[in-house]
């Protein structure tokens, strides 16, 4: 495929045709377009944007670069949620088994860590033996049998997005709003869904920190999903602090298991219950958000949700006993507490610095080819608004060696700001807006 004239046109602010976008994506997935040319095109898109036709065509091209699940009419409604990326965001690990335990089917395709944010796929791969590379046939059969599967993009499923995602990470083009929208919706189209909930992060740890741009992305995602026949709702949620406490792959799996037993941190539980309620309402499996929320809480307290995770682990090669004894997850060789250097009030826990600390410890990637260390990370118990005394433990660092402990503690000293004044409000509201096809509702 001759790509230079397409790059030139995009560079000069012109639009490419639907056929051009679709052929470009299938050629890229087939390895017929080199990364350096695609990188130039991505940067032109970041700078010049995409018109609505191009956005639809790119989404189509990404989705059609691979195969699609096809469940047929009359089967259990499929629903999924996707996040735009955060630090400590292990919600998907909790939601997929929870919602499946309540009668919906969740065929989830997830991505890897991107920049300072974690990726569900890397978290899943920290579970010994867990297979994320199911074929389309295996995934479909598993969803039909137990109601849930959690996989990554493969050569069959959204292969063009798999390559583009990694290339964007290495070329400072993650933040392009149309590229994020097309990446997310294309993966979800391959799942043959009846409903999608998107968690659009805002605040200093999000790829798009400002409210205005987060709302733009949320509205674009809702329109793109709905136009493709998949009713979509977006929630704007706080990423001006890490979500929950654990940040790092196996550490987050352990916290997700605790959440499925009802013992997760309050912010994580709140987000999980709201998103579960939105998912079930969207596909008509409940009478409304409040009833669905109460049902979700019951699914957790009754043990049904944790039992569904056991089924999922068993189906994909992991050890189901991990749900009762998470000590079987990879453990870092050394760990140490990070203590408050002074008394005062926690003003801010900077999620970006925490996320980058996990990357530095080896829990994320600095280069596409890096292997991720499943065991390392930090567990930050301090939250904005807490009163602390000097010497009080605020976090723990889990590392390969003592140098990692020192680096982790140094990063936490930067990330956790302690002041003399009580900070107002403790940060952004956890869930601030709800965006549907017709409206933007302010929730807090
Ligand atoms: N998640 C995705 O799947 N794609 C993006 O571009 C960002 C977050």
Image: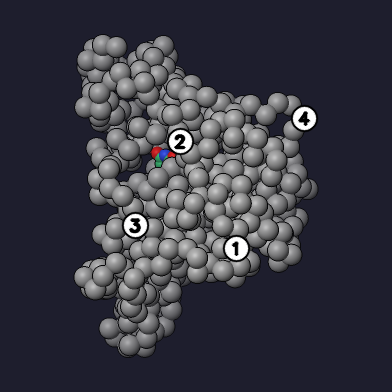
Residue 347 vertical placement versus 49 (above, below)? below
Q: Secondary structure at mark 1?
A: helix
* Residue wearing tag 1: 321
Q: Is 314 situated left or right of 176 in this image? A: right
* Residue wearing tag 2: 153
* Residue wearing tag 3: 373
Front: mark 1 or 2: 1
Residue 101 vertical placement versus 75 (above, below)? below
Q: Earlier in the sequence, mark 4 or mark 1?
A: 4
Front residue of this view, candidates 127 and 9:
127
Q: Would residue 272 be visible to someone looking at this image?
A: no
Mark 2 to mark 4 CA distance (whole Å): 27 Å
Q: Quadrant of residue 162?
A: top left
Q: Earlier in the sequence, mark 3 or mark 2?
A: 2
Mark 4 to mark 1 CA distance (whole Å): 34 Å
- Numbered badge on residue 74: 4
Q: Which quadrant does ligand 1 occupy?
A: top left
Q: Position of residue 124 (x, y in %)?
A: 48, 51
Q: Would residue 155 be visible to someone looking at this image?
A: yes
Q: Label 1: how many residues lie within 10 Å, few (<14), some (14-19) or many (20+)?
A: few
Q: Quarter holding the C terminus?
A: bottom right
Front: mark 2 or 4: 2
- What residue do we see at 45% from left, 68% from top? 245
């Amino acid at each position: 495929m001759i790509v230079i004239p397409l790059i030139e046109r995009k560079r000069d602010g012109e639009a490419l045709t639907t056929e051009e976008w679709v052929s470009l994506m299938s050629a890229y997935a087939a390895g017929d377009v080199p990364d350096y040319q695609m990188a130039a095109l991505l940067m032109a898109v970041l700078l010049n944007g995409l018109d609505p036709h191009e956005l639809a065509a790119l989404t189509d091209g990404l989705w059609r670069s691979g195969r699609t699940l096809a469940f047929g009419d009359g089967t259990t409604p499929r629903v999924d949620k996707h996040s735009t990326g955060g630090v400590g965001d292990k919600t998907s690990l909790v939601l997929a088994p929870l919602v499946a335990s309540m009668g919906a089917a969740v065929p989830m395709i997830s991505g890897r860590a991107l920049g300072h944010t974690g990726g569900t796929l890397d978290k899943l791969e920290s579970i010994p033996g867990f297979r994320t590379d199911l074929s389309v046939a295996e995934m479909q059969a598993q969803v039909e049998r137990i109601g849930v599967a959690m996989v990554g993009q493969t050569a069959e499923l959204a292969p063009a997005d798999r390559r583009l995602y990694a290339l964007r990470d290495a070329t400072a083009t993650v933040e392009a709003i149309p590229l994020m929208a097309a990446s997310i919706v294309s993966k979800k189209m391959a799942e043959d869904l009846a409903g999608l909930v998107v968690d659009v992060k805002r605040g200093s740890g999000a790829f798009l920190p400002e409210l205005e741009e987060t709302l733009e992305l949320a509205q674009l995602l809702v329109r793109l999903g709905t136009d493709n026949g998949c009713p979509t709702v977006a929630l704007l949620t706080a990423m001006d602090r890490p979500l929950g406490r654990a940040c790092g792959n196996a550490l987050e799996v352990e916290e997700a298991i605790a959440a499925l037993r009802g013992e997760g941190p309050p912010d994580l539980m709140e987000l999980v219950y709201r998103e579960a309620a939105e998912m079930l309402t969207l596909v008509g499996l409940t009478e409304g958000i409040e009833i669905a929320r109460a049902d979700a809480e019951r699914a957790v307290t009754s043990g049904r949700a944790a039992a569904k995770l056991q089924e999922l682990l068993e189906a994909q090669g992991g050890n189901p006993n991990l749900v009762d004894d998470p000590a079987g997850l990879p453990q870092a060789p050394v760990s140490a507490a990070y203590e408050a250097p002074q008394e005062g009030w926690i003003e801010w826990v900077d999620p970006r610095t925490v996320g980058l600390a996990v990357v530095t410890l080896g829990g994320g990637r600095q280069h596409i080819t890096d292997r991720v260390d499943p065991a390392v990370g930090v567990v930050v118990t301090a939250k904005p608004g807490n009163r602390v005394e000097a010497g009080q433990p605020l976090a723990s660092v889990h590392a390969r060696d003592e140098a990692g402990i020192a680096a982790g503690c140094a990063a936490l000293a930067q990330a956790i700001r302690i002041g003399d004044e009580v900070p107002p409000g403790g940060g952004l509201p956890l869930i601030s807006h709800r965006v549907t096809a017709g409206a933007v509702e302010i929730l807090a």
